[in-house]
Amino acid sequence: MIRTAHTAGLTRPEQEAIRALLDEAFDEFSDQDWDHGLGGMHALLVEQGRLVAHGAVVQRRLLHGGRPLRAGYVESVVVAREHRREGRASEVMAVLESHAPGFDVLALSASDNGAALYESRGWLRWRGPTSVLAPDGVRRTPEDDGGVYVLPGRAELDLDGGLTCDWRDGDVW
């Protein structure tokens, strides 16, 4: 069963289970990475009382084509090792994608392992240059080029154009 809740509605045991699953799945999952997935809506897939998959969508601001976009940014998508390749991530993503009508666009930064999942669900790889609106101005993020994916919504997008995200500590994308 998938439970959805805003970060404020998560219990302490749920938060601990999510963090443990993320720490187990990702070699270098930092406190900043954890913070990036907070403050939005979570999808928790629980089976037999155990969390087996999770994902979150948080609000961010992106800039594209000279205009701001209200973006739902997908974070902290994870599936327990013993349940991978069983469709659990797709179930979580379907719930997160259901929030698309509230945003101009959904976006995420994909790992090499996750890209195939997102592409199979209709997400499009951003082909243009990526940047961040840093405290000292717009700064290119070439290390993120080719790793950002979008699920278009209300906004018209040029996938070859520039895309700039708002500033945050740690990995900006």
Image: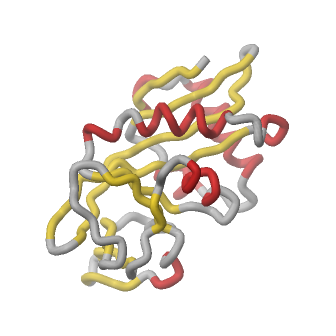
Q: Does residue 166 lie above or below 39 as drawn?
A: below
The image quadrant of residue 38 is top left
Q: Residue at x 53, y 22 (%)?
A: 11
Percent of width and height locating residue 4: 47, 24
Percent of width and height locating residue 48: 75, 14
The image quadrant of residue 136 is bottom left
80 vs 90, nearest the viewer: 90
In this picture, residue 45 sits left or right of residue 93: right
Q: Does residue 9 lie above or below 69 as drawn?
A: above
Percent of width and height locating residue 103: 26, 45
124 vs 92, nearest the viewer: 124
Q: Residue at x 26, y 58 (%)?
A: 61
Percent of width and height locating residue 112: 66, 65
Q: Residue at x 62, y 51 (%)?
A: 117
In the picture as drawn, the residue positioned furthest to the right comes out as 82
Indicate how the structure is coloured in the image: secondary structure
Q: Residue at x 48, y 78 (%)?
A: 145
Report the quarter where the C terminus lies. Answer: bottom left
40 vs 11, nearest the viewer: 40
The image quadrant of residue 162 is bottom left
125 vs 141, nearest the viewer: 125
